């Protein structure tokens, strides 16, 4: 959390330090945030190899957005088949953006009906698994604070 706070406040050196220490402790989100820093070149020199490294580390450990971003990188490199696999996994983990991409790909005939249906079911199961009365109450409280 401190790394995110530092990054949001523009303290990229501090963010880098916190994220680097957190990755050494196995923090999946820290790998994701370092990938963004290396991609954007904020606080560090842009480095595509390190972007890939940190995204892969986070994705392997179950970070949905990292998996989604790997799909985007693969698509950008002309490897649509690999990109689709990443987006299916990300959708299965509950990533909405990946599900939207798969929906579009299904409409274009790039994903089979069976694969899209399976991804849709898995996405819904992942979303349902994160629901709880406490989360819903916290979301309502956050929305109320935003209207103040």
Image (cartoon, rainbow, N blue to C red):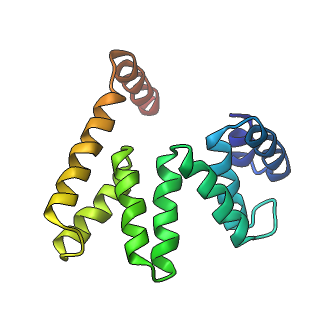
Q: Who is closer to the viewer here, 107 or 13?
A: 107
Provide residue 57's location: percent of width, then percent of height.
63, 51
Q: Which quadrant holds the N terminus?
A: top right
Residue at left offset 52%, top offset 71%: 73
Q: Which quadrant holds the C terminus?
A: top left
Residue at left offset 74%, top offset 42%: 23
Q: Residue furthest left?
A: 113
Q: Who is closer to the viewer here, 131 or 54?
A: 54
Residue at left offset 30%, top offset 56%: 99
The image shows residue 14, relative to residue 35, as above or below, that is above
Provide residue 119's location: percent of width, then percent of height.
26, 52
The image shows residue 127, relative to residue 31, as above or below, that is above
Provide residue 43's location: percent of width, then percent of height.
81, 59
Choose top left, top right, bottom left or bottom right for residue 135: top left
Marker count (numbered): 0
The image shows residue 130, relative to residue 97, as above or below, that is above
Q: Residue furthest bottom?
A: 78
Residue at left offset 34%, top offset 51%: 91
Provide residue 31's location: percent of width, then percent of height.
67, 49
């Amino acid at each position: 959390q401190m790394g995110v706070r530092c990054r949001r406040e523009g303290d990229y050196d501090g963010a880098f330090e916190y994220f680097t220490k957190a990755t050494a402790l196995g923090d999946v989100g820290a790998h994701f945030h370092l990938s963004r820093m290396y991609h954007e070149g904020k606080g560090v020199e842009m480095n595509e190899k390190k972007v890939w490294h940190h995204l892969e580390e986070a994705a392997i450990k179950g970070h949905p957005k990292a998996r989604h971003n790997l799909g985007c990188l693969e698509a950008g490199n002309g490897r649509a088949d690999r990109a689709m696999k990443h987006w299916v996994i990300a959708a299965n983990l509950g990533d909405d953006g990946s599900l939207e991409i798969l929906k579009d790909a299904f409409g274009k005939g790039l994903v089979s009906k069976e694969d899209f249906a399976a991804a849709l079911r898995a996405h819904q199961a992942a979303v349902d698994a994160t629901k709880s009365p406490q989360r819903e109450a916290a979301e309502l409280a956050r929305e109320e604070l935003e209207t103040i």
